[in-house]
């Protein structure tokens, strides 16, 4: 991504909120320009099209959320269920981060014109989440006899939980999200515990 001028950075800061609320089709470059304190013609001096602005904001959102994921897993430590902190914080992150709201809305409703760019970027984001969980799980269960291929299954299951919660964030109520999180976390935790017990029994 090219280096942004202060004015272009301000446009992107306004645009991420606007795109998160309205999506691509219903968004207005004129409204973004007004909120950024400039005329629409001045906005075009920084971004030649709606697509260019949208893709730039998407790249910024990806960078923000990738940094957040890395820090969140570092703070999670190596006790309890790997990745649980990320799951527990996800709803508050969604409520406070326009970058995440924009990222999820765009991933689930991508503009047809730039769908390949959006798909590739979001798959990379999910890949980072999987990688962070994998690293945490391998570290936590290194002293057990759980086989790597068994943990790989849980890596995919964890990503499935994340995807399910993303859908809840977009479509459901906070109450529904909390209920889904509790159910999935319990099943996931119980399954990991059963696997550990079975592995110890096989020693």
Image (cartoon, rainbow, N blue to C red):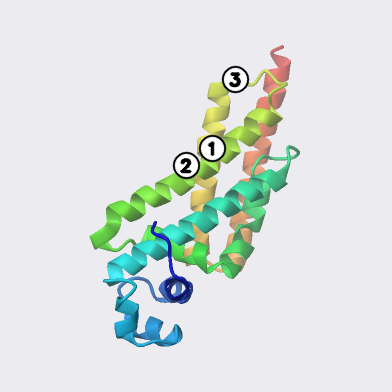
Asked if the residues shown at circle 1 and circle 2 are in contact, with their CB atoms under 8 angstroms apart, the answer is yes
Name the quadrant containing residue 31.
bottom left
Taking 172 as reference, is 36 above or below it? below
Mark 2 sits on what residue?
A: 127
| Location of residue 161 in the rendering, given as x and y in whole percent from the top left corner | 54, 47
7, 147: nearer the viewer: 7
Name the quadrant containing residue 39.
bottom left
32, 196: nearer the viewer: 32
Residue at 56 percent of width and 66 percent of height: 97
Taking 5 as reference, is 42 above or below it? below
The quarter of the image holding the N terminus is bottom left
Residue at 61 percent of width and 33 percent of height: 135
For the residues labelled 1 and 2, the Cα–Cα distance comes to 6 Å
Of marks 3 and 1, which one's residue comes earlier in the chain? 1
| Location of residue 54 in the rendering, given as x and y in whole percent from the top left corner | 35, 67
Camera sees residue 26:
no
Camera sees residue 54:
yes
Mark 3 sits on what residue?
A: 147
Residue at 60 percent of width and 62 percent of height: 93
Mark 1 sits on what residue?
A: 131
Q: In this view, which residue lies farthest toward the right?
A: 79
């Amino acid at each position: 991504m090219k280096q942004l001028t202060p004015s272009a950075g301000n446009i992107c800061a306004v645009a991420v909120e606007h795109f998160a609320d309205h999506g691509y089709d219903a968004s207005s470059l004129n409204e973004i320009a007004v909120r950024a304190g400039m005329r629409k013609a001045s906005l075009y001096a920084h971004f030649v099209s709606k697509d260019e602005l949208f893709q730039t904001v998407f790249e910024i959102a990806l960078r923000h959320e990738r940094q957040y994921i890395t820090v969140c897993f570092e703070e999670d430590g190596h006790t309890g269920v790997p990745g649980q902190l990320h799951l527990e914080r996800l709803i508050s992150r969604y409520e406070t981060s326009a970058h995440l709201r924009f990222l999820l809305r765009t991933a689930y409703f991508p503009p047809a014109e730039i769908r390949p760019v959006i798909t590739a970027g979001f798959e990379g984001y999910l890949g980072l989440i999987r990688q962070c969980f994998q690293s945490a799980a391998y570290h936590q269960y290194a002293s057990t006899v759980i086989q790597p291929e068994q943990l790989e299954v849980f890596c995919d299951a964890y990503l499935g939980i994340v995807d399910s919660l993303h859908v809840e964030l977009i479509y459901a109520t906070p109450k529904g999200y909390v209920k889904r999180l509790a159910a999935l976390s319990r099943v996931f935790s119980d399954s990991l515990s059963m696997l550990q017990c079975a592995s110890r029994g096989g020693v």
